[in-house]
Image (tube, rainbow, N blue to C red):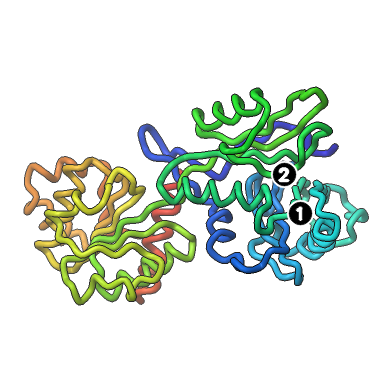
Amino acid sequence: MILGEAVRAAESVRPGGHRRLARLDTSLELLLERAPADLSARVLATVVATAGSTYRKPGARMMIMADGSYLGLLSGGCLEADLKLHAQSVLDSGVARAVEYDMRGPDDVLFGIGAGCEGAMRVMLEPAGVGTLAAAALAAAGRATRAGLETWLLTVHESADLALGTYCADDELPAVAIRAAQQALAEGASRAFEFNAPGRTRCYIQFLAPAPHLLICGAGQDAQPVAAAARALRWRVSVVDHRPAFALAARFPGSHVLLADGSALRSVVALESCHAAVVMSHHLASDAAYLRALADAGAPDYVGLLGPSSRRERLAEELGAAAGGLHGRLRGPVGMDLGAVTPEGIALAIVSQIHAWLAGR
């Protein structure tokens, strides 16, 4: 086997101290949101180990349909054609299997795909239609993470004793595997794990933190591309505004839209569940109220404020002593300096800065 070394998760990050964990690899959400509900014949492909330089890391997933179409990517398009052939074999037999790709040599003669990636990857392929082990495990994990909870998935990719496939916390597993999964959950880190039951069993335990939760305070026209950019990354998005004409769910597809002013913010949004907030109502008194609520709550650790430095300073004066509650958390003007001039460009700058901050960059 080419990929026997231990693997540490890269899909969840703890940017520092007490900050809540966020998972930037949202391939799970992609599959749960977009996989056709009425299509039973499909194969789940999961990266369970890598070595060297690879496009995706352990825990990344894609779904391959019976017609050859697929959701997600495990490479930059280099391996997908070959994976589809293996997936068809899994569909025909109904038996899960692992495949390996090693592109670290100079010739790349084994697969003839000429990827030049200088990396190796082990991929687990398993039936994932209605009623399968994989479908149930993904659904259970999705329910937990959508609720803002941490959970785990365990993928057995080599064993003479256990059925190969993806298991969740609700499934029956050997006690040694359960303990390892619970330890991964406690430590907030994924891991490769081997045990004897009684034969050798290799598995990948993926710790799953919730996807990032972005709170947007203000539902004006320029808030729409911010929400859209975050939703394109499959983040959870909540939008709050005090104006009934703006706080409309139809204006923010996929987001949770609430009608409330700043004084009611803490009663309508669990701020402790948010990873980042952006204040952008374009209404001075409303922005001050939102900032005051965020300062009092002490969460989230990232608070962005739209507008120039002079407006930030004026709002600080409005807040008075309460502004101290935002010390070290407030970023204003919000966003990376990308030279953005359109609402869409500004949204890109804002979401890019939040993404970088979540990744500890």
Q: Is residue 205 above or below residue 32?
A: above
Foreground: 100 or 264?
264
Q: Quadrant of residue 334?
A: bottom left
Q: Quick check: marks 2 and 1 in contact, CB under 8 Å?
A: no
Looking at the image, the residue that sits furthest to the front is 131
Q: Nearer the viewer, residue 335 or 209?
A: 209
| Viewer can see residue 260 | yes
352 left or right of 132 in image: left
Residue topped by disc 1: 117
Pick the front one: 102 or 107: 102
Question: Which residue is identified by label 2?
Answer: 165
Drawn side of residue 55 relative to residue 269, left or right: right
Q: Position of residue 317 (x, y in %)?
A: 7, 52
Direction from residue 93 to residue 353 in the image, left or right: left
Q: Is residue 325 above or below residue 242?
A: above
Q: Position of residue 316 (x, y in %)?
A: 12, 51
How far is mark 2 from mark 1, CA to CA?
27 Å
What amino acid does circle 1 point to? Cys
Q: Secondary structure at mark 2?
A: strand
In percent of width and height, residue 281 lies at: 20, 66
Badge 1 crowding class, 10 Å Cα cut-off, few under 14, some 14 to 19, many 20 or more, is some
Q: Residue at x 85, y 55 (%)?
A: 93
Residue 114 can be seen, yes or no: no
Judge left or right: residue 292 versus residue 22.
left
Q: Which residue does the image show at 25% across and 49% down from the upper left?
A: 330
